[in-house]
Image (cartoon, coloured by chain):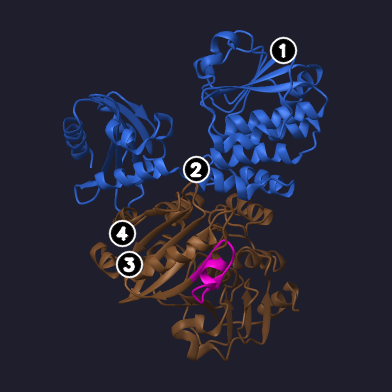
Chain colours: A blue, B brown
Amino acid sequence: MTDLLTVSRILKEQDNIDILTHHYPDGDTLGSAYALCGILQNMGKNARVITSGTVAGKYEFLSEGVKKQEFEREFVVSVDVAAPTLLGENQQEYENIIDLCIDHHGTNSIEAKVKYVEETSAAASEIIYELAKVMDAEITVPIANGIYTGVSTDTGCFRYTNTTHRSHLIAAEMMASGADWQDINTAMFEMKTRAKLELERMVYRTLEYFFDGRVAVIHTTLEMQEKAGIGDDEVEGLASIPRRIEGVLLGITMREKENGVFKISVRSNKGANAAEFCQIFGGGGHAAAAGCTVEGSLEEVKAKLIEAAEKLI
Amino acid sequence: MTDLLTVSRILKEQDNIDILTHHYPDGDTLGSAYALCGILQNMGKNARVITSGTVAGKYEFLSEGVKKQEFEREFVVSVDVAAPTLLGENQQEYENIIDLCIDHHGTNSIEAKVKYVEETSAAASEIIYELAKVMDAEITVPIANGIYTGVSTDTGCFRYTNTTHRSHLIAAEMMASGADWQDINTAMFEMKTRAKLELERMVYRTLEYFFDGRVAVIHTTLEMQEKAGIGDDEVEGLASIPRRIEGVLLGITMREKENGVFKISVRSNKGANAAEFCQIFGGGGHAAAAGCTVEGSLEEVKAKLIEAAEKLI
């Protein structure tokens, strides 16, 4: 296994570097990419970030922290990209020419000359932090912003089970280095679009309890999405709604993907197993969070789910 | 000003210690009190926590971390209690016999023989952490749970502006000391009662936008509370709903307290001043969060608020 000192040495020898994020980039892939870009530019190198798919407006400040540079690429790094397909529109051009792959997904299947995959990191940005230390890079404000954004978003603001005490230590250091942590937290965790709120309002109306409140079900339909004026990419974070209700063991979210096809997200509290539930429908996942796809009308699919839930609860 | 070494010396000399929390205790006053209680008990002293008002079920695990002890009290400590009235039902018995007051509210008006008030701490639990270090106390799991709970709840899980890099450093150390941080975060920030969710569902239906979405207003009435089956103490956390919507400058929450009397909570984003708004109605607060009371029917009060908002926006 390559160590960070080797990664550091390789990067120091290179110039004109493309940094790839994953498709529909999130806070960690963007935070990692722009932090690394800043580190390389501060060493006098040319570097730029290549994204794929829509980048949400709330991440724009990250790109403002680096210089826009034009150059002939000589070296390619991917960050937080677990598989070639996740390169999205960049897959064809880049999948066979990646020189260095930095990631924290144990399942990483990227083909690269050098791979540094570190599964115990809560975020890829934690690896970038460690790399910055090994490279002896100064943590400027834009770099601190990238790393703080990556760590806070991938840990759900220090709540998810992947959070470690190191995540907090890194956050503390990024705050001390001037990260705009208040603005970042507001943008990442507080603000919602009107369309998102409108959809949530409709979703709340669909909430139903079963089996003395041990199972709760919500749903969205294509019609609801259209009425709320919300794009498919923006529909996220709904699955936690039913699971957060006291007494609920299984929280089921049904999302109409196309006519007659529902994507089912299941979240469980202690006393129920989401993966076991989803396996009934050919899906899978973890004990606390799993998913599957079920075909049929809204009422048909709901009836199938309730019937399956009754056996498990 | 007393320093922590003095506080430590005083506590080491005492035994049979009552530790007071504030009325309707929250995670910080309880976390501080039980952590301190554990520290003192581990030194072979008798100590117990005296609360006032209902203690929410989610905090029960904190009291399970200390021994129940009966004794004749000889020494009284208050933690996170900013004023005598906040002692609630314990005010009469205790307000004149407090030996040591530990707090992080700059406005602290408790009369005590010795006071240690440290305003730069995000939570009183941060002071208890520092005290544990000075007293050379081992951070056992129950003590780590108390301190983690206090810091995470008083910082809104590391999001509020009072969060410092020290809050993260302390959280990191409490995690390393075995704090049940996952269960704590789930209980503190994730779970809602069905009644709370029912009220939220009704509140979402009241949401109205004004002035191109720059002002958003929600309300609760006594009737809604009764219909949802929710106690007055449980109605919290609503005020952030309208402020979190993209484009909203002033988020106004109207809460009927008694017939014809509304408590108004105002939260603002950059570009509006909540305190300025509330001053119009004789209230006050900070630029980002302020409050006031307005009398009248729901429609009358709303009309007054909208009229005032128009002038400020």
- Asked if residue B277 lies in the magenta stretch, the reply is yes
Q: Label 1: few (<14), some or many (≥20) within 10 Å?
A: few
Where residue B199 is drawn, which disc sits there? 4
Circle 1 SS class = loop
- Can see residue A134? yes
> Are marks 2 and 4 in one subunit?
no
Marks 2/4: CA–CA distance: 27 Å
Task: Tally the marks.
Answer: 4
Where residue A73 is drawn, which disc sits there? 1
Q: Which residue is mark 3?
A: B299
Residue furthest out toward the right: A44
Q: Label 2: few (<14), some or many (≥20) within 10 Å?
A: some
Q: Amino acid at mark 3?
A: Glu
Q: Chain of mark 1?
A: A
- Asked if residue A103 lies in the magenta stretch, the reply is no
Using residue A265 as the reference point, say whether residue B25 is left or right of it.
right
Q: Amino acid at mark 4?
A: Leu
Tell me if residue A66 comes above or below residue B119 in the rendering: above
> Are marks 1 and 4 in one subunit?
no
Mark whose residue sits in front, 3 or 4: 3
